């Protein structure tokens, strides 16, 4: 029998992160998942066989501490899912410096910082590093002015990922910037197109399809390439 694949999912208390954990477990993966607040981890705990760690991705010392704690582990998949929608008013003049700073730090800077800390723990050659981007991060598609700051933060994540990929050096892995679809979660809302299960099934299918391919790809949960 082949050994179970291992995954580390960042931001799994609810929504797509929780869905990714469920889909991977159903596929026989061994999963470690993080939550910001263990008091909000009931849904994740109820899933069963998952190792739960505490992490606020914005906290640099916590990221370093977790990578130290998990330093003996090698992951076939690191999926940085955590993200925020940002302020209610997304016009440049309507949001505060603190709100914009928080949005860009969490969505674009913290994921790359985390990847930098953990890259040595992703399995060489076959390992996959996935970021939860969005089709809104594509700068070729004029869309969603009401989410202008969020859209820019995902474009910034894609750009930061591009820079990160150029610095990988010896580390051979596949990097994915993934669009999950418009999904019914706290962030996506009830009116969204698809449910979490449909999205995460597709996302895990893409992880499997791209395993071992190398390079950096921007694709949606159905495997369709998105223009940068
Ligand atoms: N839903 C959609 O339609 C859609 C479309 C495109 C892209 N996305 C992206 O998909 C990802 C997940 O979205 P979702 O719809 O599942 O949203 P969600 O239901 O709002 O869940 C967001 C998750 O991120 C975690 N999180 C936020 N900031 C964090 C931080 N600093 N450190 C650690 N964890 C943090 C939250 O933890 P807490 O429970 O502690 O708050 C929660 O688990 C996000 O990156 C989002 O931008 C979503």
Image (spheres, helix red, strand yellow):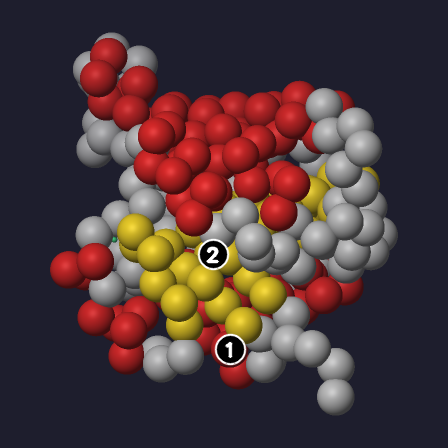
Q: Residues within 10 Å of mark 1 (few under 14, many from 20)?
A: some
Q: Position of residue 185 (x, y in %)?
A: 32, 60
Q: Residue 25 — which label?
A: 1
Residue 81: tell me if it is visible: no
Q: Position of residue 152 (x, y in %)?
A: 46, 25
Q: Looking at the image, which residue is at 81% across and 50% down?
A: 125
Kindly identify the residue that appears in the image at 58 percent across and 24 percent down. 160
Q: Does residue 226 appear left or right of residue 90 in this picture?
A: right
Q: Which image quarter holds the C terminus?
A: top right
Residue 197 versus residue 73 in the image, above or below = below
Pinpoint residue 74: horizontal percent, then vertical percent: 62, 56
- Confirm whether residue 97 shows in the render: yes
- To which quarter of the image does residue 103 belong? top left
Residue visible at 59% across and 65% down in the picture:
6
Pointer 2: what residue? 9
19 versus 177 height, above or below = below
Horizontal and vertical percent position of residue 214: 82, 46
Count the marks. Answer: 2
């Amino acid at each position: 029998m082949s050994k179970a694949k291992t995954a580390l999912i960042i931001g799994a208390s609810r929504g797509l992160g929780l869905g990714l954990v469920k889909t991977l477990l159903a596929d026989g993966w061994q999963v470690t998942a993080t939550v910001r607040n263990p008091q909000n981890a009931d849904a994740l705990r109820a899933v069963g066989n998952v190792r739960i760690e505490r992490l606020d991705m914005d906290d640099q010392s916590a990221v370093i501490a977790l990578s130290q704690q998990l330093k003996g582990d090698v992951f076939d998949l690191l999926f940085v899912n955590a993200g925020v929608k940002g302020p209610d008013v997304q016009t440049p003049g309507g949001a505060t410096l603190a709100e914009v700073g928080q949005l860009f730090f969490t969505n674009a800077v913290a994921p790359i910082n985390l990847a930098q800390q953990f890259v040595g723990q992703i399995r060489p050659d076959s390992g996959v590093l996935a970021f939860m981007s969005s089709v809104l991060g594509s700068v070729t598609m004029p869309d969603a002015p009401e989410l202008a700051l969020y859209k820019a933060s995902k474009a910034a994540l894609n750009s930061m990922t591009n820079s990160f990929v150029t610095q990988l050096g010896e580390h051979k892995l596949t990097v994915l910037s993934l669009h999950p679809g418009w999904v019914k979660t706290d962030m996506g809302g009830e009116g969204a197109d698809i449910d979490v299960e449909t999205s995460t099934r597709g996302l895990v299918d893409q992880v499997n399809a791209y395993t071992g391919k190398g390079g950096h790809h921007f694709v949606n949960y159905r495997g369709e390439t998105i223009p940068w």
